[in-house]
Amino acid sequence: MTSLVRYIAALSSSAGLIIFAIAPLDGLDLVSSRLLGLAVIVVSLWVTGIVSPALPAIILFLVVMLFGLSPPSVTFSGFSAGAAWLTFTGIIFGLAIHRTGLGDRLAGMLLQRFGHSYAGAVAGTVLVGFVFCFLMPSSMGRCAILVPLVIALADALGLSEGRRGRTGLVMAAVFSTVLSGYSILPAGIPTIVMAGAAESLFGIVLQFAPYMLLQFPVTGVLTLLTIIGLSLILFRDGVDHGAAPAPVADARPWTVQERRLALILVSVLVLWTTDFLHGVSPAWIGLSGAIVCVLPRIGAMDAEAMAKDCDYTPWIFTVGIISLGAIIAESGLASLIGVTLFSLTAFEPGADGKNFATFIAVYSAIASVTTTAGVPPLLTPMANEIAAAAGWPILTVLMAHTLGQYVMLYPYQIPPILTGALLGRVSLLSTTLMGLCWSTIYLAVIAPLSFLWWRWLGMFV
């Protein structure tokens, strides 16, 4: 780790400590000011990665409880969130896929489909990540299944841990299955939250086909192509088949453990894709599958593996992220930030380009504090006011929520990406680099082209 990273972490943490110590700040009460300082400390430690990602989460819990900044039900709300248990599911499935050898078998299938080159592996990974968006409603769940498979693929290609190519494959998998999901109506939690609020508040029911027509042909396609390009450029590498044994998944017979795990995974996928019939949360479906994995006699691996081989850091980290967002929202800090941002902006009827850019800027600014999942509950109720100020139909304002989700100034803003990176053992610095490069291209190229597409479709009249 470079001295520059340590310097940035120390400087950011010191700024947070000062804010915490001198609270209250002008315009904020004591609790909000202290939470702002604490958030700066915790997020800076997460982004720079100078300590284990679980440690800032534990610091968050301790400080909030010691100073009474939020009630316990809110402080530890991350433990009751489905996203956290999907991360836990991913840890168990990842270990099971590795220990049973199913990962090597599936990696062999991927190699046959996408060739033996690094570029082919990246393109294939991105394609698989996109296809997964139609199979699973939760981006956390998609990462839980996809990342272990990509790691097995990296091993088959001779891309050992620490290699740039291994990092590139994980980044391609995570970014593609999370970001491309924004162009598919039921494939992203922020979109689902917005759609639910739109129906309850305004009686507007978003439909799959019109939503995808608006979001996918330009934004979705360019997102996939950009992720492929960034993975190849930022993490350029070559495969080394001699560094790892060639996959023999198709030659050897299936073991009992592989068959059991395959049955469990297929069952979980089927239940995930039919949630509209049974109404069970993807989190509890995934958790049930993880429990079956370690049950004696019928599971795919022994229960002792949970104690000996599982790294629960991504789980604690996810709990911390969700809890921080809930704490900030409960304190009123997020709402205050949103109102302040809108008071500083000027939507103008007829200035569609300016309004388009302003909405993206406001959304991403709020997401930098609350994460993308925390923005829809704040912005959706304001849709009527924004529509009146911008001169847009209210449906356009609702659809524009998706455009702000793509911006990632640092990984904390999009928890599934950061959690997926941790599951793949990718450093937060590499994740931040990928996110900044992606956001630059998105804001400079993809968002303007999306605006032209929206205008051609008549969304602003």
Image (cartoon, rainbow, N blue to C red):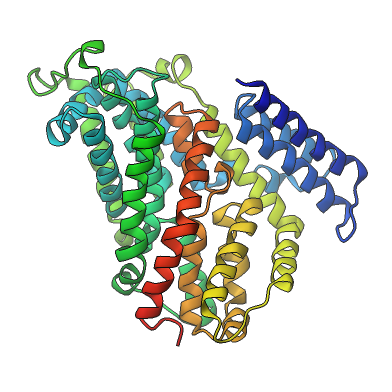
Q: Is residue 227 left or right of residue 436?
A: left
Count of marks, rendered view: 0
Give percent across and percent down for residue 440: 50, 51
**Depth check: 46 or 443 in front?**
443
Give percent across and percent down for residue 284: 42, 45
Is residue 280 in view from this perspective?
no
Give percent across and percent down for residue 341: 71, 66
Residue at 45%, 66% (x, y): give it. 448
Residue at 21%, 16% (x, y): give it. 241
Which image quadrant: the C terminus? bottom left
Q: Is residue 313 above or below residue 134?
A: above
Q: Is residue 402 left or right of residue 317?
A: left
**Depth check: 398 or 311 in front?**
398
Residue at 67%, 21% (x, y): give it. 3
Q: Is residue 457 left or right of residue 318?
A: left
**Depth check: 242 or 266 in front?**
242
